[in-house]
Amino acid sequence: MKKTRLNAVHKEAGARMVEFAGFEMPVEYRGIIDEHLAVRTRAGLFDVSHMGEIIVEGPEALACVQYLTPNDAAKLAPGQVQYTALTTPEGTFVDDMLVYCLSVPDKYLLVVNAANTDKDFAWVKEKAAPFKVFVANRSDEHSQLALQGPLAQEILQPLTDLDLSQMKSFTFSFGKVAGIDCLVSRTGYTGEDGFEIYTLTETPEVIWKAIIAEGEPRGLMPVGLGARDTLRLEARLMLYGNDISDRTTVLEADLKWIIKFQKGDFLGKAVLEKQLQEGLKRKLVGFEVVDKGIARPHYPVFAGGRQVSEVCSGTFAPYVRKAIGLVYLPIEYTEIGTEFEIGARDRKLKARVVPTPFYKRERK
Amino acid sequence: MYPDNLYYTKDHEWLRLEGEEAVVGLTDFAQKQLGDIIYVDLPQPGRVLEAHQAIGSVESVKSVSDVYSPVSGEVVAVNPELAQTPDLINKDPYGQGWIVRLKIKDKSELNNLMKAADYEKYLEGLEH
């Protein structure tokens, strides 16, 4: 099992550790609900060093990224970030990811899911073969910390030479945090304002401890993968393997906004165009459990007297205090307000299609 | 963490003997494994249970698990507080977080349960 460079720090803090994507990771420190609420109301610090970092570099890097992804990477200037996907020729997901534009048109950083890093790297390398690019998997060298929550800027500012007040959402800059060289982006996976901090240092615990020291008096908590999952689901952010996979298309996942059909050719384009013309047969929707109970991944879903699918993501959402989830339903059941049933062990729970995100922060 | 006056099961329930009755709850180990408890599904008083039969279930943010009756008996009361504040099981597993009270059918079944020291050894075995 792999360890991040912050492994000892988590154990010192009393975290419960679990295996995730081949890494020994903290699942919770003080409890999922407390950690979740800390991020919604104050701030939380995550070790997400397990995430994958793949560099695509060379004169045709932009052309290569454009071919591999449905979003329009040509819109990115250096210092900008974009949510997009690696798509198969069938318009389904190899992964979802962030693209960081380091230099136009010759250097891009792909930040991918830990569980998919090796698969993604092999995929990108293979598909990039016709392009004049060099593809490198830099995941092991990188540590990544995420500082998320309404107090994130206030906590990070005293520790960095970057002017965070000037850093817009989905942009990044290079600077020092706690005296260490970092890439800092205003991004995250929680639905809150916040930053993701990438560094090549051998001692990321210096940054971790500095943020804890600065943040704890303001109510910051370290946050494990348990609350990371409940936070991202409340904000309707996708989890590969649960909500999206190589068996679901980008359109079915209701991510049409990351497809830019006008930009030129990309993997899966023809299939997605056809699917758009013909109309979807099923779509990912958010639901609330009406009865008392929590829907979990893989619980069977029933509509019109038959099983139609199974739950993708499902949990108790600590901030909205409801049992929520995501599920692919036949298109005729996807209207807001439609009721259906979920098999929860020996019971059937009534559930209802609701608008998403389940939680949206108030913007200042 | 594992009071000496209680009996324990391999499924991480505890039992406290009170005359002919038994109070049953989940151990500290169990509540820690479950994490924040959100719902508790409890039986109706009057229900007759066999040893190892499911009494009900507890559901946390992370998972759901059954609670089993340590001995055979009849449910005489369920903790009324758990409907509103299920996390009493997290906060006070051996006190306010009790789950059901049973009228014991056959006290000799207590011999099948573990004492605190044995339970702690059993937990060490689980954690390697």
Image: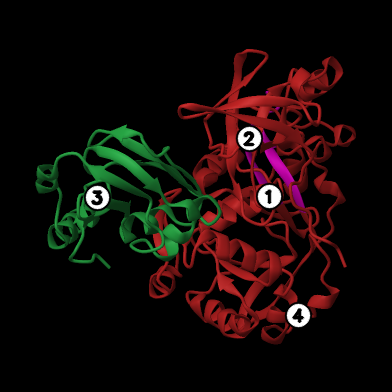
Chain colours: A red, B green
Q: Chain of mark 3?
A: B
Whether residue A88 appears in magenta in the rendering, the answer is yes
Task: Confirm or deny contact between disc 2 and disc 3 (CB under 8 A).
Answer: no
Between the C-alphas of marks 4 and 1, the distance is 30 Å
Question: Helix, strand or loop at disc 2?
Answer: loop
> Is B50 in front, or is A101?
B50
Q: Residue at x 64, y 73 (%)?
A: A182
Number of on-image labels? 4
Which residue was labeled with disc 4? Answer: A162
Whether residue A261 is visible to the viewer of this picture, yes or no, is yes
Q: Residue at x 73, y 84 (%)?
A: A161
Q: Amino acid at mark 2?
A: Ile
Whether residue A181 appears in magenta in the rendering, the answer is no
Among the two numbered marks 4 and 1 on one chain, the one whose residue lies closer to the N terminus: 4
Which residue was labeled with disc 1? Answer: A234
Q: Please report the bounds of the magenta region as a residue range.
A: A82-98
- Farthest-out residue, top: A305
> Is B96 in front, or is A94?
B96
Q: Chain of mark 1?
A: A
Q: Amino acid at mark 1?
A: Glu
Residue A354 as seen in the image, left or right of residue A36: right
Q: Position of residue A203 (x, y in %)?
A: 48, 77
Question: Helix, strand or loop at disc 3?
Answer: strand
Nearer to us of marks 4 and 3 is 3
Identify the disc placed on residue B21: 3
Q: Chain of mark 2?
A: A
The quadrant in which residue A327 appears is top right
Q: Amino acid at mark 3?
A: Glu
Between the C-alphas of marks 4 and 2, the distance is 35 Å
Among the two numbered marks 2 and 1 on one chain, the one whose residue lies closer to the N terminus: 1
Identify the disc placed on residue A244: 2
Task: Confirm or deny contact between disc 4 and disc 3 (CB under 8 A).
Answer: no
